[in-house]
Amino acid sequence: MLFNEFDLDPRLLKAISKLGFTKPTEIQRKAIPAALSGADLMASAQTGTGKTAAFVLPTLQHLFRRPKNSGLGPRVLVLTPTRELAIQIDKNIRQFNRFSKIVTGLIVGGMAYSPQLKILRNRVDILVATPGRLMDHMERGKVDFSRLEIFILDEADRMLDMGFIDDVKDIAAVMPQNRQTLLFSATLEGSVLNIAKKLLRKPQRISLATNHDRHRSIRQHMHQADSKAHKHKLLAHHLENNQLTKALIFTSTKRGADQLARNLRLKDHKTASLHGDMSQNKRRQTVENLRKGRVEMLVATDVAARGLDIKGISHVINFDLPTVAEDYIHRIGRTGRAGAAGCAISLVGSSDWQKLAQIEKLTGRKINREVIEGLEPTGSEPKVKRRAKARPKTKSGLAQDVKKTKSSKSKRRRGHSSALQKTKQTRVRKAA
Ligand code: ADP
Ligand code: MG
């Protein structure tokens, strides 16, 4: 299928070809017609699959098709969790808008207020914003959503993870009911589904392979470890497995990687370490040694393994769990490639449970708990307290709802708002 098979304006097709896009990606093939139909839509697809164009193209098409009505407020709002994403989306819109004159504006934190106030005072078609700064402007009565036609939530899952749920609800609450809402996310599970139910009306749903599905061919399990010594015993047990032909073992530090590699060599395992203190060349050489079978296992850190093409791994073993949950996905993605079955084993020590909870939340599945006879853990699994994220909300007050559970971002913002309130109060007092 080609882009010109969509019902898109020639100005858009020209911009698309200028960008060098020849064929729409799968999410674009499915989401563009759905969005053009005017229906609400929730869509998930892996990162890097072209979700931005999947909502920008139908949005621009909509703006071309429907003549502008009177008024100044935005006709489209794109809400995204971070400033970097907002800047990127704004840039993408400008690229597709190269041969047309849709007016766009960017409202993000960390930038001066006055140019943003200017954007909001003048006619704007598409506003790209992060929730924090947008709420600031809304609280000061500077945003008019009365003519809003399309509301787009990009990276909805991350938005919720970052604690923006109340802001998203507040922003949606002041929009016209008959708007179109498009929600894009890496997954459509858990809290994303809940917010989608609240904000979308009879949505079409498009779910392409998520991070979760991608790892169907990988057997994932974990062992509870009492101590470092216990971890070593569990590892030794797995390294005796005949099915283990090539293993990638992850540690959290470079020193840890070196130590463990040395330790394994002493036990006659052909092992090398792979970490950031080695030159890129040395790292490539080490991986080559694994490929050729000169070594059987690598003990690596996340940074060192990133970007290296390490294939044919039978086992990925997390001696330490990654601090960033997404690294878990990168790690285990090294095994089970090209249809081959893979095995991912995690050793979970007493300080790793919070990390495990984050990983399970991200992947949307509970990792199998396994016990090896003779190497059972002594205690039972600790209960992990879910980190408080959402900011408790009181509709009335700005200043009083500063609570400890807030994300630092919203804290900063609230700080700003209450500072604003204070200056206003001082001004009133002075005037009186
Ligand atoms: P996502 O939001 O799904 O993570 P992006 O929208 O950021 O993905 O797109 C990822 C990359 O793919 C961008 O560099 C974008 O320019 C490129 N891209 C998007 N659609 C196409 C296409 N149809 N053909 C070629 N490249 C594309
Ligand atoms: Mg994206």
Image (cartoon, rainbow, N blue to C red):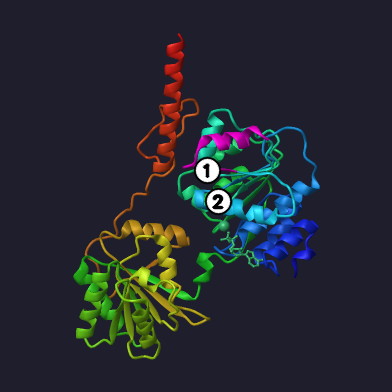
Circles 2 and 1: CB atoms closer than 8 Å: yes
Percent position (x, y) of residue 148?
A: 68, 38
Residue that mark 1 sits on: 108
Residue that mark 2 sits on: 87
Whether residue 111 is visible = yes
Which numbered disc flags the more N-terminal residue, 2 or 1? 2
Query: Crowdedness of circle 2 by 10 Å Cα count: few (<14), some, many (20+)?
Result: some
Q: Which of the labelled discs sits on residue 266, or is there none?
A: none
Q: Relative to 379, say whether 73 is above or below.
A: above
Q: Residue at x 33, y 56 (%)?
A: 354
Nearest the eye: 103 or 237: 103
Query: Quick one: quadrant of the N terminus?
Result: bottom right
Q: Could you tell me how far apart the alpha carbons at marks 2 and 1 are, in whole angstroms?
A: 8 Å
Disc 2 residue type (three-letter): Ile
Percent position (x, y) of residue 191?
A: 51, 49
**What segment carries the magenta color?**
106-122
